[in-house]
Amino acid sequence: MNEEAFCPATAAIDLLQEKWVLLILRELLTEPRGFNELSRGVGGCNPSTLSQRLDRLVDMGIVSKTVQSVMPPRTLYALTSAGEGLRGVVDAIDAWAARYLIERPGRSACCRAAHMESEEAVPHLG
């Protein structure tokens, strides 16, 4: 029997390459958010897909889900310590994109605005 050995790096890449996951994490790095706030922040993700991605992140212990007892009830999503551990990964991707993809044609206004601050913080290489 030839079983594939579990590789944590492959599992992480598989998760992070899922569409919307990195954008969800980037939104949650600033502060906990409700579902509608996440939906607006991520932009373009249909609610069913967003819900599926959030459920997966909760199941993996990367995101916590808290139902607040207010009227109407509000669900708040936040990063766990495992999710906070991805801050460096998301920041590195943002910095790399700001450095090397900033001049690419076809960027949306949302994307340009998200990277305006990071342009100043990125060290210029060579």
Image (spheres, rainbow, N blue to C red):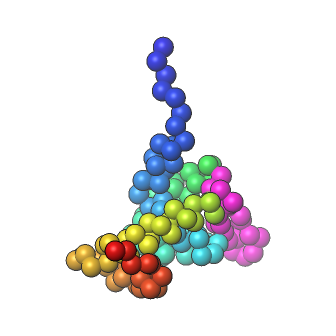
Seen in the picture, residue 11 relative to 73 is either above or below; the reply is above
Q: Which residue does the image show at 22% across and 77% down from the upper left?
A: 105
Residue at x 53%, y 33% (from the top left corner)? 6
**Visible residue check, residue 48:** no
Query: How far across and down, in percent of the image, does residue 117 sit?
Result: 46, 85
Residue 64 lies within the magenta run: yes
Q: Is residue 33 above or below residue 22?
A: below
In the figure, residue 20 lies in which quadrant? bottom left
Residue 75 position, x and y percent, is 66, 67
In depth, the one of 2 and 25 nearer the eye is: 2
Examine the rendering and report whether any part of residue 103 can be seen.
yes
Screen quadrant of the C terminus: bottom left
> In the rendered image, which quarter is residue 119 located in?
bottom left
Q: Which residues are magenta?
A: 61-82
- Left or right: 43 as drawn, with respect to 25: left
Counting from the top left corner in percent of width and height, residue 124 is at: 39, 78
Q: Please provide percent x and percent y for residue 52.
A: 51, 54
> Is 48 placed left or right of 80 in the picture?
left
In the image, is 93 to the left or to the right of 55? Answer: left
Please tell me which residue lies in front, 29 or 124.
Answer: 124
